[in-house]
Image (spheres, rainbow, N blue to C red):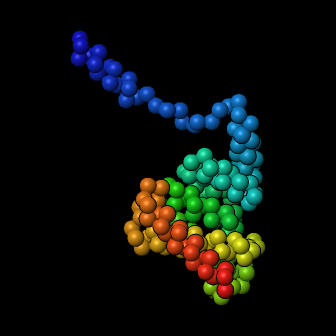
Amino acid sequence: MAVLVTLSIVWAHLTAAEPVSPLDPADPGTAELARMEDAFARDGGDVVLARRLAETYLELGRPGLAIATLRAGEPGILEHPVVAHRLAQAYEASGRVLDARATAELALMRCARSLGTGDAPSGTPIPRFACDPHQHAVLSMHRDALEHMVEWGVAVPASDARAQRAYDLAMRRVRIAARR
């Protein structure tokens, strides 16, 4: 009988789980998130809403939801460099560094093509969405940091000190370029 009681206590502790979402239903932020989710479900092509929703999920530490949201929207939203950047950030936060790097590279190339910079691919059509020089610098820094992470074999950026070092190096490059 004691073995049975012990097993049932162990089973109860193993099956007890934290709530799926730490969101408080009474919090106004939760209601706003629900409104954004409903609006995006109705209009999966809204670029501004897609970006805001992904940013909210990233702030909540839920990169998987950001990925799912952006992938579930209309494919055209990922043509926007900043939305693609948010997807790259979500991939990075979820430990998918190779996917993050590829997506960051795509976002940077779309932004570069929009601006007509020297690093722009010439064989692609001009994107539907505009990009400004500040966004280009941010996208370039993110891509460079991810390049370092891939080169150094960083698998889980959130728990690897080399990820911060990669960002430090990428930021240094941006500061040097800004001084020119």
Q: Position of residue 44 (x, y in %)?
A: 71, 54
Tell me the residue at 46%/59% (across/down): 157
Q: Position of residue 98 (x, y in %)?
A: 47, 67
Tell me the residue at 74%/41% (across/down): 32
Q: Is residue 106 above or below residue 17?
A: below
Q: Is residue 64 above or below residue 98?
A: above
Q: Can you say which quadrant of the picture contains the C terminus? A: bottom right
Front one among 136 and 36: 136
Q: Farthest residue in the top direction?
A: 1
Q: Is residue 125 visible?
A: no
Q: Is residue 163 visible?
A: yes
Front one among 157 and 124: 157
Front one among 38 and 59: 59
Q: Is residue 4 above or below residue 28?
A: above
Q: Can you say which quadrant of the picture contains the N terminus? A: top left
Q: Quadrant of residue 131?
A: bottom right
Tell me the residue at 74%/54% (across/down): 49
Q: Position of residue 139 (x, y in %)?
A: 63, 71
Tell me the residue at 49%/32% (across/down): 18
Q: Position of residue 48 (x, y in %)?
A: 75, 58
